[in-house]
């Protein structure tokens, strides 16, 4: 059994991004990322801090626009318009979730598709489904990067994705289908989850429920990607997979923490660099 070390891979990618940023800086060009953070959710604050630190480490300029929970949709939209127009900012991400009184779809659709480094704009999502060049969402993109690093060829493989959100499961499906995998996508309404996971060569789970995937649900030699992040009452961080028992049957498995999580941030840096380079080339 091989542990798919996302932490190590993310460091390698960060070093590559840093090198490219240094080259751009020599030409007087600095890639920039803006983050919009609304409210005081501690998890969102932690994620934003991690993203800002990663920018700092690689030389990407980053700025966080923080707003109280009470901000209006109109104020948020005008901030996005301002960032869309700013030539020093090439990537813009809205940290989710947003407060209930704000229409998340409306906000995400306002981000310029050229600066949409999270890949959540329907325009980019549509291009992703069509297999065109786009910004793919960072978490599924990070999973594809893990496959590449470990020479796991998904062509013709039976893949079962558990979790069908717009930011994880659905773009994961598109990326895999574009690489000619046969993909099953399961969710809360799936009748018999085990029937789907059991026959898969690769199981990818992003739900948010500890121990959702147990050893009896997977076949011998399965490749397991655990996207879930759950904080247990004792403070431990775990995924959605019963790691101890499933790892005994798996050929490859991601740990939590240290698997997909760090890759998500690495892909954000990569997408920001890509957006910056596109902007520079278009000038
Ligand atoms: P979400 O709540 O938007 O979606 C959850 C999905 O799981 C839905 O499609 C739902 O139908 C499905 N689901 C719920 N219960 C199920 C069950 N019992 N069986 C099968 N499917 C079920 O969540 P999300 O934003 O997609 O996040 C999912 C998980 O991934 C969370 O734990 C989140 O913290 C984690 N996550 C991790 C990263 C990372 O970088 N590692 C990034 C994003 C999300």
Image: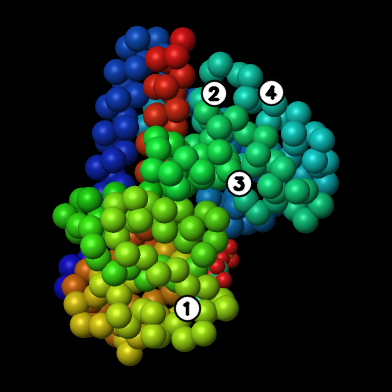
Identified at 32% across, 32% down, the residue is 17
> Mark 1 or mark 3, which is nearer the start of the sequence?
3
In front: 179, or 90?
179
Say how many tags the image has.
4
Report crowding for label 1: few under 14, some 14 to 19, many 20 or more residues within 10 A (C-alpha): some
**Element type at marker 2?**
loop
> Mark 1 or mark 2, which is nearer the start of the sequence?
2
Q: Which numbered tag is attached to residue 95?
A: 3
**Element type at marker 3?**
loop
Q: Is 210 on the left-hand or right-hand side of 199?
A: right
Q: Is 59 on the left-hand or right-hand side of 250?
A: right
> Mark 2 or mark 3, which is nearer the start of the sequence?
2
| Residue receiving disc 1 | 210
3D distance between C-alphas at marks 3 and 1: 24 Å
3D distance between C-alphas at marks 3 and 2: 16 Å
In percent of width and height, residue 97 lies at: 65, 54
Marks 2 and 1 close (CB-CB < 8 Å): no
Identified at 30% across, 80% down, the residue is 199
Q: Quadrant of the N terminus?
A: bottom left
3D distance between C-alphas at marks 4 and 1: 41 Å
**Which picture quadrant has residue 86?**
top right
In front: 122, or 24?
122
> Mark 2 or mark 4, which is nearer the start of the sequence?
4
| Residue receiving disc 4 | 82
Q: Which numbered tag is attached to residue 89?
A: 2
In percent of width and height, residue 90 lies at: 51, 25
3D distance between C-alphas at marks 4 and 3: 17 Å
3D distance between C-alphas at marks 4 and 2: 10 Å
**Element type at marker 4?**
helix
In front: 132, or 216?
132
Residue 69 vertical placement versus 275 (above, below): below
Residue 282 vertical placement versus 59 (above, below): above
């Amino acid at each position: 059994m091989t542990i798919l070390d996302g932490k190590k891979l993310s460091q390698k990618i960060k070093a590559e991004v840093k090198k490219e940023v240094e080259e751009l800086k020599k030409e007087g060009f600095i890639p920039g990322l803006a983050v919009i953070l609304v409210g005081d959710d501690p998890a969102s604050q932690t994620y934003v801090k991690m993203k800002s630190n990663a920018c700092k480490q690689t030389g990407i300029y980053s700025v966080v626009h923080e707003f109280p929970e009470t901000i209006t949709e109109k104020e948020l939209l005008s901030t996005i318009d301002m960032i869309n127009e700013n030539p020093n900012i090439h990537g813009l991400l809205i940290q989710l979730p947003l407060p209930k009184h704000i229409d998340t779809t409306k906000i995400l659709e306002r981000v310029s598709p050229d600066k949409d480094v999270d890949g959540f704009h329907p325009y980019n999502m549509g291009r992703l489904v069509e297999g065109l060049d786009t910004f793919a969402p960072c978490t599924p993109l990070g999973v594809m990067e893990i496959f590449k690093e470990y020479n796991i060829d998904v062509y013709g493989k039976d893949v079962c994705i558990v979790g069908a959100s717009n930011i994880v499961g659905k773009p994961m499906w598109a990326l895999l289908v574009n690489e000619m995998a046969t993909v099953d996508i399961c969710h809360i309404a799936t009748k018999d989850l085990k029937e789907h996971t059991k026959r898969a060569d690769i199981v990818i789970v992003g739900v948010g429920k500890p121990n959702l995937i147990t050893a009896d649900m997977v076949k011998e030699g399965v490749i397991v990607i655990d996207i879930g992040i759950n904080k247990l009452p004792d403070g431990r961080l775990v995924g959605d997979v019963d790691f101890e028992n499933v790892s005994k049957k798996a050929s490859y498995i991601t740990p939590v923490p240290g698997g997909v999580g760090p890759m998500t941030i690495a892909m954000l840096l990569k997408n920001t660099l890509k957006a910056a380079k596109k902007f520079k080339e278009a000038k």
